[in-house]
Image (cartoon, rainbow, N blue to C red):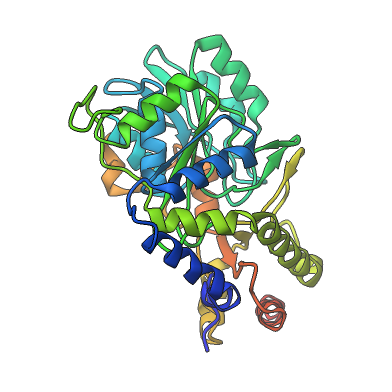
Amino acid sequence: MTTHVWDYLPEYEKERADLLDAVETVFSSGQLVLGKSVRGFEEDFAAYHGVRHCTGVDNGTNAVKLALQALGVGPGDEVITVSNTAAPTVVAIEGTGARAVFVDVHEADYLMDTAQVEAAVTPRTKALLPVHLYGQCVDMAPLEAIAARHGLAIVEDCAQAHGARHHGRLSGTMGDAAAFSFYPTKVLGAYGDGGAVVTDDDATDAALRRLRYYGMEKTYYVVQSPGHNSRLDEVQAEILRRKLTRLDTYVEGRRAIARRYEEGLGDLVAPDGLRLPVTSPGNEHVYYVYVVRHPRRDEIIERLKRQDIALNISYPWPVHTMTGFAHLGYATGSLPVTEAAATEIFSLPMYPSLPVDVQDRVISALRDVIGEF
């Protein structure tokens, strides 16, 4: 049997009764769209983060897009972010009519290099979009200072950082709004698509609720301003509401696997060889993915594939190098740290129900391959 970086079936077997009860709860409720489960999840997710508002939406891409739009980002504006991210981050920016402006990332943790941000600010800059990547947070204090100096909004992309903390503050509580994805692979994952935006601001929340529902408020068919059909599904909301009570347990499970990898591979770490994840100062990592690095990455992946261990790369193609974003004008070499990392990084299996014997098999196989170099 092939080992993959992610598998939901062990979790499903363990939580099956509760998950099927969630479906039954919705199907027998009499309301299938924007009902009690969406409202309940929104309340619970906001409470978990200690913020006033949560608006459930249909996916993480639209969570970013609607958050930006709710804060006034639109055609002609610029949003500063990173290229070392999943393409949906930039798809969402483009969906508002704004232009993505990239800065490079740090060599150690692959997160936004905040020292480069202020130089990227122009009169058209409207927002900063830090991506809390791989399970830990961007250094937010410099961004908060830049935003205050230039009158910019901050939207946190928290798709990969459910439950992560930065100097004690939960991801999603450090900007004007924060976007979450509940794609099944996430730390808090649905059994289908889903997303949400959290904020402490009443006006931003009101705008989000209009935007996700065609631009309507209370009266059906009365559109206040152009919007979208971007509602969180009632079934997914009920599943997420149940799973939210187990989020901290999921996080601890991921951290235990990370510790096991570090114990099993730590002695192989070398400046010109294997590199393991680095937790940056003030961060509490949740290990959405366990990203390692080696200059012979492609050979390692191929050799482990022959042993039925299928590894992953997050991400092999920086967004600015993709054909679909050539219009942004970033030539190869413009983001050197991002581009170099993309040739060497890869991810080991990581999900809370990953069996210990499978973890040991991955460690042993990786040690054998690296030991032969």
Vertical position of residue 355 compared to residue 179: above or below:
below
Q: Is residue 199 visible?
A: yes
Judge by depth and name the residue closer to the eye, 307 or 47. Answer: 47
Drawn side of residue 189 relative to residue 255, left or right = left
Q: Is residue 331 visible?
A: no
Vertical position of residue 70 compared to residue 122: above or below:
below
Judge by depth and name the residue closer to the eye, 140 or 248. Answer: 248
Q: Which residue is pictured at 73% across the width and 68% down the height?
A: 261
* Residue found at the far left of this picture: 221
Q: Which residue is pictured at 68% across the width and 75% down the height?
A: 370
Residue 351 percent location from the top left of the image? 61, 67
Residue 60 percent location from the top left of the image? 42, 46
Drawn side of residue 100 relative to residue 139, left or right = left
For residue 46, what is the image quadrant? top right
Vertical position of residue 350 compared to residue 169: above or below:
below
**Quarter placement of the C terminus:** bottom right
Judge by depth and name the residue closer to the eye, 182 or 340. Answer: 182
